[in-house]
Image (cartoon, rainbow, N blue to C red):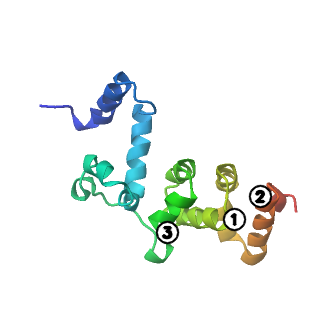
Amino acid sequence: MGVPRDNLLTELAKQLTGLKVSNCGRRQLYRYLRFYRLYPEIVRTLSPQLRKILPTRKQAQRKTGTPSPQLRIAPQKLINRLTYSHLEKFLDIEDPLKRAFYEIECLRGNWSVRTLKRQITSLTYERLGLSRNKEKLAALVKAGVEQGKGWSVVVSQ
């Protein structure tokens, strides 16, 4: 009969842990699944050997919100310029437009993971959306990032 669908990742995590595979706890497997669902285009950049073990596109298909095609970043650019730690930070952002904003700004500003985390925590996206003078605010953010201060430079002014 097999494992019930609700317990699939729990059972998989147990088996992988038993095989001494690191970073494969139930919670992390859910993050990997979320990553796969948010960035299915990255799968195409994998080697043919890895693609063989992944589910087919039809099996993995699930509707997810996506930003407009103009905001889509080429998978090669994402994996060549960002670390997995960067991509993991994006997983926590539910809003596709907000996620696209941080992806673009992270690439454009060459942000470190620490800077990305600081920009997300300080609500850069929301503040830019509410700002009346977006150009001035964007310049202040850029200046703060270059000085390693992020939004602290904006808040203090």
Left or right of 95 on screen, residue 147: right
Q: Residue furthest left?
A: 1
Which quadrant, please, contains the C terminus? Answer: bottom right
Mark 1 and mark 2 in contact? Answer it, CB < 8 Å. Answer: yes
Q: Earlier in the sequence, mark 1 or mark 2?
A: 1
User: Mark 1 sits on what residue?
Assistant: 127
Name the residue at 74% across, 77% down: 135
Left or right of 22 on screen, residue 130: right
Which label sits in the foreground, 2 or 3?
Answer: 3
Q: Amino acid at mark 2?
A: Trp
**Residue 151 disc label:** 2
Q: Residues within 10 Å of mark 1 (few under 14, many from 20)?
A: some
Left or right of 49 on screen, residue 127: right
Name the residue at 52% across, 67% down: 97
C-alpha gap between disc 2 and disc 3:
25 Å
Mark 1 and mark 3 in contact? Answer it, CB < 8 Å. Answer: no
Q: Residues within 10 Å of mark 2 (few under 14, many from 20)?
A: many
C-alpha gap between disc 1 and disc 3:
23 Å
Mark 2 and mark 3 in contact? Answer it, CB < 8 Å. Answer: no
Q: State the residue in front, 102 or 52.
A: 52
Q: Residues within 10 Å of mark 3 (few under 14, many from 20)?
A: some
Is residue 18 positioned above or below 13 on the image?
Answer: above
Is residue 18 positioned above or below 121 on the image?
Answer: above
Q: Amino acid at mark 1?
A: Arg
User: Mark 3 sits on what residue?
Assistant: 73
Name the residue at 74% across, 71% down: 138
| Displayed quadrant of residue 134 | bottom right
Question: x and y percent of residue 9 in the render?
Answer: 32, 35
Whether residue 132 appears in this view of the structure is no
Q: Earlier in the sequence, mark 1 or mark 3?
A: 3
